[in-house]
Amino acid sequence: MTEMDNGGAGQKAVEGAEQGMAAASGQLLVGIDLGTCRTIIMSNRGVEGVERSVVGYAKDIISQRVVGSEPLFGDQALAKRNFLDLCFPLCDGVIREASERDYVAASQLLEHMVDLAREENEEVEVSGIIGVPARASMMNKELLLGIAQGIMDTALVVSEPFMVAYALGKLSDCIIIDIGGGTIDICAMKGELPTAEDQVTIFKAGDYIDERLAAAISRRYPTAQVTKSVACKIKEAHAFVGEPVSPVRVTLRAEGKPVEFDVTRELRMVCESIVPDIVEQLQMLIQRFDPEVQETTLQNIVLAGGGSRIKGLDTMLAEQLREYGRVKVTCVDDPDYIGAGGALKLAMDVPTEQWKHIGVMFGGQ
């Protein structure tokens, strides 16, 4: 089911912005975090929506009698997966380029999210800012803008960690680590729009953990029936690094029967596997700050994205960087909505005709 409300924790990111100006003009402004795992939208009208980034299509004429001929999205599609061909159109935080089907599904998903933000059959000008991985290629950005052009009147793409920084008001002497499903994006904020040298994308994130966890459990317990989807649920409920507070025991099917398995060791191993790459990139980025602000920056490292929920990750990263001095790593309060909230705040703060000075866009002339 689509999760929606009017306001909520994510809306705090846009408090203080001039909502009235856009409302008075009839313009609908949206911030969109188009993620590999989940897609999130927030509007200047206070609407929030989140969907799993999956689109389902009826398999045949019999399936159509059950689910209809229109595509289903998110959890609704997953709940009726037996009747559907599922398409996950996003990979590593951008649109898959494997087939026309991915392009169409991504377009339908984006249109569905925008529809959530406006009233039924409403004709209104829609302008939005969409997040992409920090080092997304120009081709990736243009591909995304290509599908947005048929859905929105004006669209701008910006890096996802920059959206988080903007939501927090941390635009200088700060490093944002955004751990999503497809990528880990790290961005050094230096008081200006981040350049390519200020940003890093690591392609070992939530999906990578899910795949490794499923494989590790299968190796240790050959009879256990564990898929990537099952592994993802285990990760979302129990992910941790460092010493476990208590054993992680989960019930899985084994030869068709429910059996309890201890997966503590496997879960710890795969969650910790992303740490070395993050630390390596942090060490590289911190050296690019002015020496006079490096100490301040080390005490201003922020974890965001779904991966920020991995228990103990903030402490482990600080410990790994201890040779650089005192380090403070904090986690955002609202990892689900903060990216979309930052995009919306930026859309409301900056007139659309000035978006061209921020990034790649169309419209707004």
Image (cartoon, helix red, strand yellow):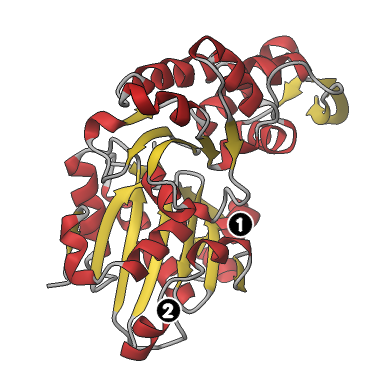
Q: Does residue 243 appear to the left or right of 145 in the view shown?
A: right
Q: Residue furthest front?
A: 292
Q: Quickly name the residue at label 1.
A: 75
- What's the residue type where badge 2 is placed? Gln
Q: CA distance from mark 1 to mark 2?
A: 31 Å
Secondary element at image label 1: helix
Q: Is residue 70 left or right of residue 273?
A: left
In percent of width and height, residue 342 lies at 43, 57
- Rendering coords of residue 79 (x, y %): 65, 56
Q: Give coordinates of residue 110: x percent, y percent.
A: 38, 62
List the residue tagged with mark 2. Answer: 19
**Residue visible at 60% across and 69% down?**
4
* The residue positioned farthest toward the left in the image shown: 365
Q: Residue at x 45, y 72 (%)?
A: 43
Residue 18 tag number = none
- Position of the C terminus, as image quadrant, is bottom left
Asked if residue 56 lies left or right of residue 21, the reply is right
Q: Amino acid at mark 1?
A: Asp
- Residue 152: x and y, percent? 28, 71
Q: Quadrant of residue 229?
A: top right
Is residue 2 depicted above or below 172 in this figure? below
Of the two numbered discs 1 and 2 on the same chain, state the one appearing first in sequence: 2
Residue drawn 52% across the image and 67% down it:
64
Circle 2 crowding by C-alpha within 10 Å: few under 14, some 14–19, many from 20: some
The relative height of residue 85 versus residue 199 in the rendered view (above or below) is below
**Does residue 67 appear in the picture of this structure?**
yes
Secondary element at tag 2: helix
* Contact flag, marks 1 and 2 (Cβ < 8 Å): no
